[in-house]
């Protein structure tokens, strides 16, 4: 039995779940808030209504999950792009710190923004 | 249709050439001829020193893998007329050391293959009198496509990760491990886990998918690896949450 503890399974779980939620949810959010509401294809909710929705803890949790997982998806993909695409695997330590550290910082910022609304 | 086609064949004669050089040969362009027939024609009629591997000529033995116009192919299943008017460039499989001409050293794959135990593992073998291990058609379907692998190594030749990191266990070996993991008669999944879930196993794969595109037998090694990633990740998280429980 292999006892080497590798973080890879956990990172891959974050990567794959991030890819899935981003693919499912981001196009809808982008379509609504980036296209349909600005172009008046759909009647946008009032500011007060949207604010109330955002203040619901469940909305905050979902948006935080989406932001954090999407960031970890980016981190994992970008790490391997740098490793294999640009063949920078010899700089593995700074790359790992930059990618996953970036995802952690981004997640903290997302949490802070969602909590201070 | 022209009656001849040019084959540009990579030659490497150890002790003579310092690196592979292309040599051109004119061979008959016949509708039924595969690239392998063209090479056999060269060997029989033009240049007996040309070396290449082949055996069955019917896409079963997996010996005649080569790089044809840049793509990994079985030379017995790749027809000259599909490349007419030519020329056709024939090189050894990429990502393997060349021994001579089109013959590559497959030692690395042969060393890796047994590490994933690609055979039926049983904790206890049932006595012979009890008869066969029965299996439903659905259970057969679970692993059947992976059992089509002929060890031709085209997937290793196509894999950009293997090109960069030769420690990667590789597509065919992992797909063959899954062929047995998914077999209802097999009980060896735990024994295969350590090699498969090591950093050189499934976690090296970045799901480029070239292996599945290159496979001449319709096996989907990329799919097998992704599927096993979920299995291994689930096991790892179980191990984290319940460190004392035996897998």
Image (cartoon, coloured by chain):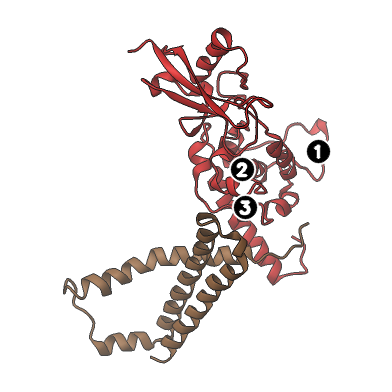
Chain colours: A brown, B red
Q: Which of marks 2 and 1 is nearer the N terminus?
A: 1
Q: Distance between the residues labelled 3 and 1?
A: 32 Å
Q: Position of residue A29 (x, y in %)?
A: 32, 72
Residue at image point 72% right, 49% down: B192
Q: Position of residue B36 (x, y in %)?
A: 53, 19
For residue B185, which numbered disc appears in the image? Answer: none
Q: Report which residue position mark 1 lands on.
A: B126
Q: Report which residue position mark 2 lands on.
A: B175
Figure disc tally: 3
Question: Is B124 placed above or below B69 here?
Answer: below
- Viewport quadrant of the C terminus of chain A: bottom left
- Mark 2–mark 3 CB contact (< 8 Å): no
Q: Where is residue B234 in the image (x, y as percent from the top left)?
A: 63, 62
Q: Determine which quarter of the picture holds residue B83.
A: top left
Q: Report which residue position mark 3 lands on.
A: B202
Residue at image point 60% right, 65% down: A91
Question: Is B46 placed above or below A76 here?
Answer: above
Q: What element carries label 1?
A: loop
Q: Where is residue B31 in the image (x, y as percent from the top left)?
A: 41, 13
Q: How far apart are marks 2 and 1 (CA)?
A: 27 Å
Label 1 crowding class (10 Å Cα cut-off): few <14, some 14-19, many 20+? few
Q: Can residue B33 be seen in this view?
A: no
Q: Which of marks 3 and 1 is nearer the N terminus?
A: 1
Front residue of A55 and B40 = B40
Q: Chain under label 3?
A: B
- Mark 3–mark 1 CB contact (< 8 Å): no
Q: Are marks 2 and 3 on the same chain?
A: yes
Q: Determine which quarter of the picture holds residue A62.
A: bottom left
């Amino acid at each position: 039995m292999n006892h080497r503890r590798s973080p890879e399974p956990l990172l891959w779980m974050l990567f794959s779940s991030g890819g899935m939620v981003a693919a499912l949810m981001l196009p809808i959010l982008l379509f609504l808030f980036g296209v349909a509401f600005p172009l008046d294809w759909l009647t946008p909710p009032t500011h007060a209504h949207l604010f109330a929705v955002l203040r619901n803890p469940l909305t905050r949790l979902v948006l935080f999950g989406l932001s954090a997982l999407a960031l970890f998806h980016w981190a994992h993909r970008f790490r391997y792009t740098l490793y294999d695409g640009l063949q920078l695997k010899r700089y593995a330590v700074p790359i790992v710190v930059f990618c996953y550290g970036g995802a952690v910082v981004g997640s903290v910022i997302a949490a802070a923004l969602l909590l201070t609304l | 249709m022209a009656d001849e086609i040019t084959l540009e064949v990579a030659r490497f004669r150890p002790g003579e050439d310092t690196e592979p050089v292309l040599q051109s040969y004119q061979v008959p362009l016949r509708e039924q001829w595969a690239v392998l027939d063209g090479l056999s024609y060269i060997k029989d009629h033009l240049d007996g020193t040309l070396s290449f591997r082949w055996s069955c000529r019917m896409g079963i033995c997996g010996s005649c893998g080569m790089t044809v116009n840049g793509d990994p192919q079985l030379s017995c299943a790749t027809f000259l007329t599909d490349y007419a008017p030519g020329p056709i460039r024939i090189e050894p499989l990429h990502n393997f050391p060349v021994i001579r001409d089109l013959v590559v050293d497959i030692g690395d794959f042969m060393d890796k293959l047994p590490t994933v135990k690609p055979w039926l593992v049983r904790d206890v073998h049932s006595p012979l009198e009890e008869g066969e291990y029965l299996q439903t058609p659905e259970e057969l379907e679970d692993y059947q496509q992976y059992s089509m692998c002929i060890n031709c190594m085209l997937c290793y030749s196509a894999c950009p990760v293997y090109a960069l990191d030769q420690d990667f266990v590789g597509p065919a070996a992992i797909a063959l491990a899954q062929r047995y993991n998914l077999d209802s008669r097999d009980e060896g999944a735990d024994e295969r886990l350590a090699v498969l879930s090591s950093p050189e196993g499934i976690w090296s794969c970045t799901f480029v998918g070239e292996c599945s595109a290159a496979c001449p037998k319709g096996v989907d090694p990329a799919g097998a690896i992704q599927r096993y990633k979920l299995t291994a990740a689930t096991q790892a998280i179980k191990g984290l949450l319940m460190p004392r429980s035996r897998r």
